[in-house]
Amino acid sequence: MLDIHQLAVIAGVARAGSYTAAAELLGYTQPAVSYRMRSLERTIGVQLAVRSGRGVRLTPAGRRLAQHAEVVLSALGAVEDEFRTYAAHARGMVRVSAIHSACASLLPGAVARLRSARPDVQVVLERATSPDAYRSLRDGTTDVALVSVRDGARPDAPDTAPDAGPGTDPGAADAAAEPGPPEAEVVDVPLISDPRCVLLPVDHPLADLRTIPLSALADESWVLDEERDEFTAACARAGFEPRTVAITNDPATAHDLVAHGVGAAVAEGLALPPRPDPRVVARPLRGWPPRRVHALLRAGTTRAPAVEALLTALREAVEDHRAANGDPAPLRLARTAEAAG
């Protein structure tokens, strides 16, 4: 009888193209992969692979068995995900993957409210890019994904520009190209609009403007992060190419560089620090639409009490944020800097 380890091996060989690469993919040794493939051939009664250069090539029977193996492994993975989620909810646990700006602004207040209302609920937080948070939702390893969505985009196709804060993986945006669950399987909860703003030294000639058109910044030097394609595209629409003088994925470092006059930087309003540097002002940008922060969750988890309690707490945290910041957050930052000056 076939076993799950044999199926995993032939699926791994089909993906990797060699026993050595399959062993690395699966966490096995190369001899273990060879042994399981020979055992599988004895069980099936047909040859499944032949040597080809430095790798192996599956026979037609091997390719067909690998296809069946993928279906079986996917079904078993779905069962594991479903009951992992069931077990987490039974323990009063809710897992959250969230972009950096939501971690910095909304989640602390939401978790505090949740603890007050439901002290039995444990929250597991993971900071992630929007694509990675969505992938975790799709894979069943998170219950709620807090993602940013570009204006005009579908909520189930979140922003590919990373917003995971320090240490963002430059390749994380590639995850957005992977297929996710159908839109009908995702429950979309819009939370708040997140304005884009530019950070400038307090003595900058444009610092007195309440909002700044992106086209007015064509001659600036820029402090940007490694994933700057969206900003570069916005600049191109405004008629210029940004001159990058420093690259950092750390928002605090970007603020410090702006404070020292190295260049201008861009930031989301929700990610602005609560205690701004008096040497820096932030102004909303015209010509670059705001992003929207959404909570996404699988349809099957909407009735879980822990998830519902967290969503309620998130909505209340958004209202707290709006009550505390009647003006957009970038304007509040600017006024604080002006008062300090």
Image (cartoon, helix red, strand yellow):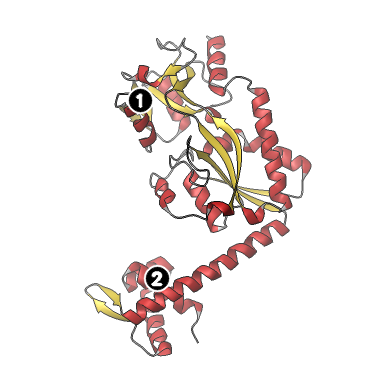
Identity, as a three-letter code, of the amino acid under mark 2? Gly
Location of residue 230 with respect to 140 vertically, above or below: above
**Of residues 287 and 38, which is closer to you in this image?**
287
Q: Label 2, on which residue?
A: 12
Q: Is residue 277 left or right of residue 327?
A: left
Callout 1: SS: strand
Q: Which residue is located at x 39 percent, y 35 percent?
A: 230
| Residue 33 drawn above or below residue 312 | below
Height in image: 72 above or below 248?
below
N-term mark: 1 or 2: 2
* Amino acid at pointer 1: Trp
In the picture, measured across the screen, residue 154 lies left or right of residue 248, that is right
Task: Tell me if residue 28 can be seen.
Answer: yes
Q: Which residue corresponds to the image point at 41% horizontal and 25% vertical from the top-left?
A: 265
Residue 289 placement (x, y as % from top left) = 46, 28
Q: Residue at x 30, y 24 (%)?
A: 240
Residue designated by label 1? 222
Few, some or many residues within 10 Å of mark 1 (<14, 14–19, 20+): many
The x and y percentages for residue 261 are: 38, 18
Specify the quadrant of the image occupied by residue 328. top right
- The local secondary structure at tag 2 comes to helix
